[in-house]
Amino acid sequence: MLEAFYATERGSLEDATINGSFDLHPELVWIDLIAPSQEEQQWVLDAYEQNLPTLKSLEDISSSARFYRDDDGILHISTYFLTKNKNYQVDGDVDDSLPMLAMVQTVAFILHKDRLFTMRGEKLVAFRAFRARARRNDYDMDYKDPTWILLGLLEAKLDELADILEDIHKDLERYSTEVLNNHHREKILDLDDMITRLAQQEDMLGKAQLCLIDLRRVLTFLARPRALGSHIYDADIRELSEDVRSLVEHDAFLFQKVRFLLDTTSGFINTEQNDTIRRFSILPSMLAPPMLIASIYGMNTDVLPFAHGSLSFWIVIGILMAFLVLPMFYFRWKKWI
């Protein structure tokens, strides 16, 4: 898919209809390619003489070559974006009670003096949010300068990461209530499910931290004097860098909270398992004395007391019941059962 945008006189971005390379005119300031076909990449090459990387090369690119300016003065940036997908079950149904799974996708930015090229493997929420705001010019930017589009997309990425961390924080507060107020803990299965949820949240926090650190590296690169060639973007880059710093700290706090809940839930599971084992160990202790008496009176001998007489059977049964009931009351008094 290939989408293109141009800057209007009122300072917003509008999309243009693209049916071939002949529609890619010089007034377009942003060319957005989503899993492009070879034909669409050829359109860009014919119209702007710009070679585009393949999606496979975006995944394999080394960290040292993620941000650079080539000999023609074209800026190349590859950065991570975080996406959330529904947690599908084996049978294909969606379980909304579970947190969504996180995936990291690499997006390529190629910044010319007159336009910006972006390339990605699938649709992203941050791009959709930026386009909606750019149509209304909520960012109050001059979109005729493609550098502002680049900074706007990075800001949209930061906003999405902030929303993801906020959602995780809300989920962890709810999980804290469920774990810490679950006094009875009658089902180990519920606690096992909680561990799965917390592990998924920890995985998402790790990927969010990866994207934040990668964004901080991008902003550090853009803050260099030779990167953008102008100081008019310095204030916005510093503001974004400060927001990244605060989100990294918030992410670290959420990491600690997840670890605390994981340790607490694991402790509850161990306590529940120990209680179960203790109950099973008490049962043989209660049954051992009656079984001993029953085995003694089962011997073929006449010297046992209460071995004869019409009341002997009931006397022995009473002794057996006493040895069974008295330990039960003792264990309940000790609150072992």
Image: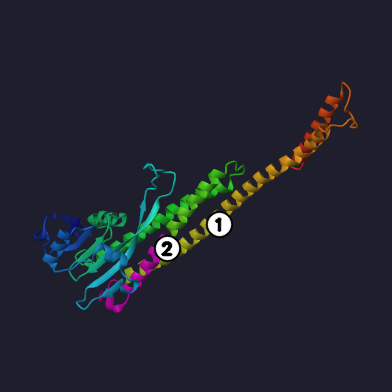
Drawn side of residue 138 relative to residue 191, left or right: left
State the residue at coordinates (11%, 60%). Answer: 21
Q: Magenta span covers which residues?
A: 207-233
Question: Magenta stretch: residue 219 in it?
Answer: yes
Q: Quadrant of residue 284?
A: top right
State the residue at coordinates (57%, 42%). Answer: 187
- The crowd level at tag 2 (other Cα within 10 Å; few <14, some 14-19, many 20+) is many
Closer to us: 121 or 157: 121
Residue 305 image offset from top left, x and y in percent = 90, 31
Judged from the image, the secondary structure of the residue bearing numbered disc 1 is: helix
- The crowd level at tag 1 (other Cα within 10 Å; few <14, some 14-19, many 20+) is few
Outermost residue on the front side: it is 300
Drawn side of residue 309 relative to residue 222, left or right: right
Q: Quadrant of residue 282?
A: top right
Kindly identify the amino acid type of the residue bearing the numbered disc 2.
Gln
Q: Which mark is residue 209?
A: 2
Query: Where 204 falls versus 73 (above or below)?
Result: above
**Res 25 visible:** yes
Task: Look at mark 1 in the image and give the residue it sits on.
Answer: 260
